[in-house]
């Protein structure tokens, strides 16, 4: 497909059915304030021919450009992100009869899966004429916005909780971003950021408060499909859940692949959260339509310290429609899992990325996975920023 470009058609709100013209900068739905999601014109689009074309393109997430919102290849902002490996693990004695894979995003630019969302969001922002933006972050999203903002020539401000690992704070500043340190959780950082940015004309890159980060996260699902193929897809994907954009993105990816006639079934999406901050898991177990804020949240995994995810309806929808579920792990289990992944498998995982590995015995005990199935664990980031000089 020479000269291929985005097939973006509209931005749509599932809460009130409003459609928005994507040709202008927009954050949340102008009618009800909920999340807007990109929709693409797939009428007459030849899925098998597209997939064959994709396989001949450079190994970055931009190989899926027809299903991404950036208007033309010339507008892409890239540091070589995407197309991370899927690694096999030997049989785990905690889960006999199960096959485990790891999708490892720790080697992406800026060290985490946040590079995916910010690459696409920043490219689209630049294409639409935005020149200044901000984000509240637990660390990785801030580093990614700082790096891609530098690449695109955007001025950015990052609002970080004081407990953010120093390596991430330093990285944001090294990329030239202005850093504002805030007491409390990412929820507090978000509230502070929106007050401070009111009236400045800057763009909010927060999770699910703009339409395009989820499109970058969607490439996680597209890559799993391309690398494994429809006949070797895992039965379940175990994903560490903070804001939940990745769950929304992967569910969206599998839906679009089904619409193109390339996929018959979607893997079950299983959300993993720390026991000290598990609002999504609680809502899933209670059958609630939306999450309620988690009181007194605590965990060693900063990216999972999200007591009140925005647009939780979309997150719960993604898990439920896939036939998935939620599960919790403790902080000591996360620490042990990170050490085991490194020493036993040579995989560097952040606390967030280690949570799915920590969940294995719980998945078996609660019968969320079954012998004979393939289960993909998503490592969302490198563990290096969290070492702080420790030896283990």
Image: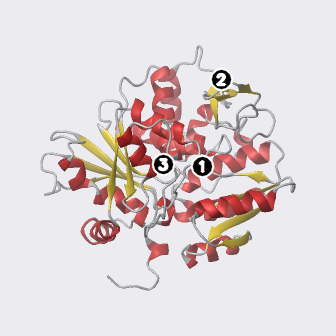
* Real-space CA distance between mark 2 and mark 3, rounded to the nearest whole angstrom: 33 Å
Q: What residue would you read off at disc 2?
A: 17
Which of the 4 quarters of the picture holds residue 10?
A: top right
Which of the 4 quarters of the picture holds residue 348?
A: bottom left
Q: What residue would you read off at disc 3?
A: 83
- Labels 1, 3: front one: 1
* Real-space CA distance between mark 1 and mark 3, rounded to the nearest whole angstrom: 14 Å
Residue sitting at x 23%, y 53%? 362
Name the outermost residue toward the top: 44
Q: Who is closer to the viewer here, 63 or 304?
A: 304
Q: Secondary structure at mark 3?
A: loop
318 above or below 277?
above
Residue sitting at x 62%, y 46%? 213
Q: Residues within 10 Å of mark 2 (few under 14, many from 20)?
A: few
Percent position of residue 18, x then y: 70, 25
Q: Secondary structure at mark 2?
A: loop
Residue sitting at x 35%, y 30%? 230
Q: In the figure, is residue 311 to the left or right of 21?
A: left
* Real-space CA distance between mark 2 and mark 1, rounded to the nearest whole angstrom: 24 Å
- Labels 2, 3: front one: 2
Q: Secondary structure at mark 1?
A: helix
Q: Which mark is residue 342?
A: none
Percent position of residue 115, x then y: 58, 55
Q: What residue would you read off at disc 1?
A: 117
Quadrant location of the N terminus?
top right
Q: Who is closer to the viewer here, 52 or 37?
A: 37
126 above or below 334?
above
81 above or below 338?
above
């Amino acid at each position: 497909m020479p000269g291929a470009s985005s097939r973006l058609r509209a931005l749509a709100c599932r809460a009130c059915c409003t459609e928005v013209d994507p040709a202008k900068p927009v954050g949340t739905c102008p009618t009800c304030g909920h999340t807007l999601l990109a929709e693409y014109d797939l009428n007459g689009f030849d899925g098998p021919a597209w997939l064959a074309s994709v396989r001949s393109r450079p190994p970055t997430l931009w190989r899926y450009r027809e299903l991404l919102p950036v208007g033309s290849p010339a507008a892409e902002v890239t540091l070589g992100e995407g197309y991370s490996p899927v690694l096999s693990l030997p049989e785990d004695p905690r889960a006999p009869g199960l096959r485990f894979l790891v999708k490892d995003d720790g080697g992406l630019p800026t060290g985490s899966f946040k590079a995916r969302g910010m690459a696409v969001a920043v490219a689209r922002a630049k294409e639409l004429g935005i020149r200044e933006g901000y984000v509240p972050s637990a660390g990785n999203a801030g580093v990614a916005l700082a790096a891609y903002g530098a690449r695109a020539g955007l001025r950015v401000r990052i609002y970080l909780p004081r407990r953010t690992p120093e390596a991430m704070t330093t990285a944001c500043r090294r990329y030239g971003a202005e850093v504002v340190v805030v007491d409390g959780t990412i929820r507090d950082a978000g509230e502070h950021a929106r007050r401070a940015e009111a009236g400045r004309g800057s763009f909010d890159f927060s999770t699910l408060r703009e339409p395009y980060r989820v499109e970058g996260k969607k490439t996680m699902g597209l890559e799993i499909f391309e690398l494994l193929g429809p006949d070797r897809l895992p039965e379940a994907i175990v994903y560490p859940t903070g804001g939940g954009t990745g769950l929304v993105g992967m569910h969206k990816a599998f839906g679009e692949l089904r619409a193109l006639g390339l996929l018959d079934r979607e893997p079950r999406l299983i959300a993993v959260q720390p026991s000290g901050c598990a609002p999504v898991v609680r809502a899933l177990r209670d059958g609630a339509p939306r999450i309620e804020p988690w009181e007194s949240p605590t965990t060693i995994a900063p990216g999972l310290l999200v007591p009140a995810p925005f647009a939780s309806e979309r997150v719960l929808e993604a898990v439920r429609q896939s036939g998935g579920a939620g599960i919790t792990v403790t902080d000591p289990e996360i620490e042990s899992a990170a050490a085991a992944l490194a020493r036993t498998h040579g995989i560097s995982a952040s606390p967030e990325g280690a949570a799915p590995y920590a969940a294995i015995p719980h998945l078996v005990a609660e019968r969320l996975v079954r012998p004979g199935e393939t289960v993909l664990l998503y490592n969302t980031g490198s563990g290096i920023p969290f070492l702080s000089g420790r030896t283990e």
